[in-house]
Image (cartoon, grey):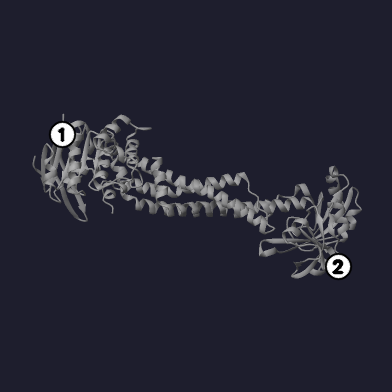
Amino acid sequence: MDSLILANIRQRPTRTLVSVIGVALGVVLILVNTGLVRGMLNDRSRRERGVGAEIIFSRPGANDILSASGLTLDIRYAERIAKIQGVQVASPIGKYLQKGNAGLGFELVDGIDYPSYSAMSGIKIVDGGVFQADNEVIIDAFKARKSNAKVGSEIEVFGKKLKVAGIYSPESGARVKMSLSALQNYMGSPNKCSWIAVKCEDPAKQEEVQKRINAELPGNTVQLMRDLPSFERAIPGIDGFIKTILVLSTIVSSLVILLAMYTTITERTREIGILKSLGASKRFIIGVIEREAITISLIGVGVGLVAALIIGWGIRTATTLQVEFQWTWILVAALIGLAAGVGGSFYPAVRAANQDAVKALSYE
Amino acid sequence: MPILQTENLVMTYHVGKVDVQALRGVNLSVEKGEFVSIMGHSGSGKSTLLHILGGLLKPTSGKVIVDGEDLAAVGDAQRTDIRRRKIGFVFQRFNLFPTLTAEGNLKLAEHIHGKEGNGNAELRREVLQLLKLENKMKHKPLELSGGEQQRVAIARAVINRPAIILADEPTGNLDSENSDIVLKMLVQLNRDLGQTIVMITHNPEAAGIARRKILMRDGQIVSN
């Protein structure tokens, strides 16, 4: 039976290729999309942890550090927080969200008070210097490498060409930073920031510090960094997006397999009649068609995995977007590819098995 | 006890609102080891009879007893099972799998029959020798002549040693030379292996090689 299945796959290379592409497309859709979501969220999460704060102080109802929410908080809170017992540094940070480079995704810009931010996060200028004017920014090494930017280059922020004054390391928060006062000027919000990052003298006592801040400045939101929701939960609809991708991929792959196998069994009506004349049971005929579809699906899954890896590498190389593949999703994509093969070929297989033997044998 | 027996076999096709009686009470008995030919004009009912004898069709009424089992009294799945175990078909158009070699076609028949691995190698060798196919096993059907293809089809039919071989115009697509070869081989199979064969044909010369000739007309046996 195996030789019949392999012979059929080889005999109809175009049909096989179309089916393989259909399954591979589903696998690529799942892996690249989940990889992109995972990569972007993890990258952002890593960099936000790199800020070095234990506590985030923001206006009530304001969103957390996971999103940019404009400049709504008075920066004078930073001075008051800095005086509270147990606080080592309180650094006001402004957030601005702009369109990503090359039109892909989005990009955050931080407005920072460099001395306090540097003291909290440990970032250092590794090339050039700190911004001195409103038209100057600093960028991290990753951004410099991906944008082919160096000290003195220009990058676009607020639709204006701003000069790269320096390159900093390690990665922390947004990859592009300007002075908080510059950001306030550009956004027309003087003396405002998005939130205040607080570093404690003793991280083990951050809950006590949190209580003191709450007591001193009631009515605001004081959150521990470790209690912040994961990025996946913080971004609304991300689960729905991934589920949609899964369903779409399954439908696309199943439909391609269904159409390919349906066409195949129509072409092979006579051969099905021969199988019946030889005494092949319905189960046997369904088995032949299902095994053929599974073999095609396995090839499709393999091709899809390789294609997804290549596309992921291409995205990472050509853009600042991150793609991270997870074994869980690779397994899910492979199972969905196989399920599409089994499911998509089931109807054609049953139809073939139920064909009238005499009519099938006289099929031209 | 006959290896094949029909009792008052009736087959009616429903074509729209019209009923067409293809068989009108056919009684037939074939003994083990017999070579029987069935002749008749188009529409005489011989193809319908062959399909019913092979379990490809279920009769409207009557009995079809093959090696002790009544094909008319069982469902589709059981008919398929009886066909798998007891019947081999040879068709006018050979009906080989074009994607498989001659050997692949034989192995597929053995696999469906339930033989695992290489099947019965000794029997296969004997059949191939008898049909002079030893050197053709690696060829695909399109690489073989019509006569060779029909010999492979005969080998496939006989490879599982069925109780009966049903041949449907086995020489209908062959020239006279290849027809002679194929008919001689059927005779040889019948003589050397004791294979029971029922063959339908238009050709009186082909029918002449059988030990018994049956003539059908208008869905009935008119001469036996």
Disc 2 secondary structure class: loop
In the displayed structure image, the side of residue B54 where residue A204 appears, left or right: right
Residue at (32, 31) in percent of width and height: B121
Q: Position of residue A281 (x, y in %)?
A: 33, 40
Q: Which chain carries label 1?
A: B
Label 1, residues with CA under 10 Å away: few <14, some 14-19, many ≥20: many
Of residue A1 and residue A30, the one placed in the foreground of this image is A1
Q: In this view, does A197 lie above or below A181?
A: above
> Residue under circle 1?
B34
Same chain, labels 2 and 1 = no
Q: Furthest residue to the left? A: B223
Question: Which quadrant is the N terminus of chain A positioned in?
Answer: top left
Given residues B99 and A211, the one toward you in this image is B99
Q: Position of residue A308 (x, y in %)?
A: 58, 52
Give the amino acid at mark 1: Glu
- Identity of the residue drawn at 85% across and 52% down: A120
Q: Residue at x 18, y 34 (%)?
A: B190
Q: Residue A133 carries which label?
A: 2
Mark 2 and mark 1: Cα distance apart in space? 108 Å
Q: Where is residue B83 in the image (x, y as percent from the top left)?
A: 27, 37
Q: Is mark 1 on a helix, strand or loop?
A: loop
- Does residue A139 appear in this view? yes
Check the image and report above or below for A259 versus B197.
below
Amino acid type, residue under disc 2 in the picture: Ala
